Amino acid sequence: MGARIAAVGMVTALGLDWETSCAASRAGILRACVLDHFPFQTEEIGDPQFAKGHQVELLAKGFEGFGRLARLLAGAMRDLHSRVAEFPEVLRASGVYLSLPDPARNRQPDESPDMEKADVPPSPRDLAVRLVTQASRFARWSHAPKLEALSLAGHAGFAQVLHQAVADLNSGKTAACIVGGVDSLLDEDTLTWLLRSDRLKHPAHAAGLMPGEGAAIFLLTGRANSLPEICSIESVNLGEDSKTLMEDKTSDGGGLWRTVRNLQSWASLRSSPEPLRLSFTSDHNGEVYRARELGGFLVRCGGQIKMDSELPVSLPAISFGDTAAASGALGAAVAARSMARGYTRSDHNIVLSTSDGSQRGAILLRRADNGR
């Protein structure tokens, strides 16, 4: 099981393309800004307060909901298209596997849909098809690719659609595919949900998350394809943890560890006689739940494998904020860039994903043999 990454398109608060976003992140540049469109008050501080967030201002500012996602996805699609313009037939033959936010995630536990409304809301899949069509038009693609798979699992959503895409490549169902994720936590409804859930980082709540937004998409091909290789996807595994944030339980990292341990290539990595040159990319976002889970995972991992140094962990949320359904895609894009440019010593990187619910994901990337 595996696939090759031939091209990456990306937009974040740090840049409107893959290179700029990753280079600015590596340099430690931050562009978090005050979210002046969302004033709120807390019991601790009576005056109006403002949170900070990582906003893609040139693309997304002033847009909400569907329109905001369409703008972000279009930016990533435009970046991807610029890299494979000489291979138009590959894009035309590629379906899309997409991780998106759940439309119902902002709903409070005591809320129910408004049954008095005459219009039946479109299904998530219908919305996703519309999103891909609209984003393709914004990006000036000659066609709108077919939606092959959709995940609404949040942070682990990218791992889920990537798992399906790699399976389709290996079965011969497709020769190439487009896999990615897009999300924004900066629209008013989502910020309200985060504030009510006591998850938003602000002056009276330092242990919350800083919201962000972004999109990243990948052109994947099979092993025998002639397109250039940035790096390869060795294996993808999906797992679960019964102790979830949504149930207000504390995870000890066991579910994430089992997800990594059951990667198809994990046994061969562990059996290597030489110390591993391995790094991790985590979607840890600053919340206490995530910190405890990651800490428990690293303790387990450190006791089971022989490394040539301490376990290096990259946290893209420091640069881009929490990007939820897009976080796995952004994490994989950063990891792929670090190996392609050679500014990491690691030959392998494992992208870790933790959803608010039970879903977990692990993606094993390997440096390309051509040393790009």
Image (cartoon, rainbow, N blue to C red):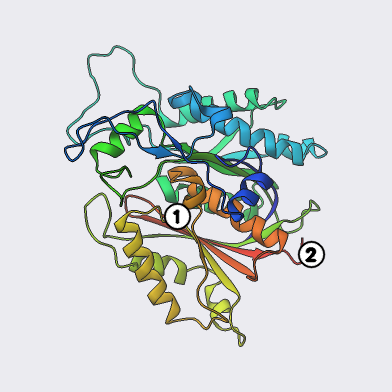
Task: Find residue 250 and report its horizontal and vertical position in percent.
Answer: 25, 61
Q: Is residue 187 visible?
A: yes
Q: Image quarter for residue 74? A: top right
In this view, 308 is above or below 35:
below
Q: Give the residue at mark 1.
A: 283
On-image quarter of the N terminus? bottom right
Helix, strand or loop for disc 1: loop
Question: Between residues 52 and 77, which one lies in front from this camera angle?
Answer: 52
Helix, strand or loop for disc 2: loop
Q: Is residue 25 left or right of residue 46?
A: right
Q: Residues within 10 Å of mark 1 (few under 14, many from 20)?
A: many
Task: Find residue 293 and report its horizontal and vertical position in percent.
Answer: 34, 64
Q: Image quarter for residue 222? A: bottom right
Query: What distance separates the C-alpha of mark 2 from that of mark 1?
Result: 29 Å
Q: Give the residue at mark 2.
A: 370
Residue type, numbered disc 2? Asn
Q: Image quarter for residue 295? A: bottom left
Q: Residues within 10 Å of mark 2 (few under 14, many from 20)?
A: few
Question: Between residues 250 and 260, which one lies in front from this camera angle?
Answer: 250
Which badge, 2 or 1, comes first in the chain's sequence?
A: 1
Question: Between residues 232 and 89, which one lies in front from this camera angle?
Answer: 232
Question: Between residues 219 and 287, which one lies in front from this camera angle?
Answer: 287
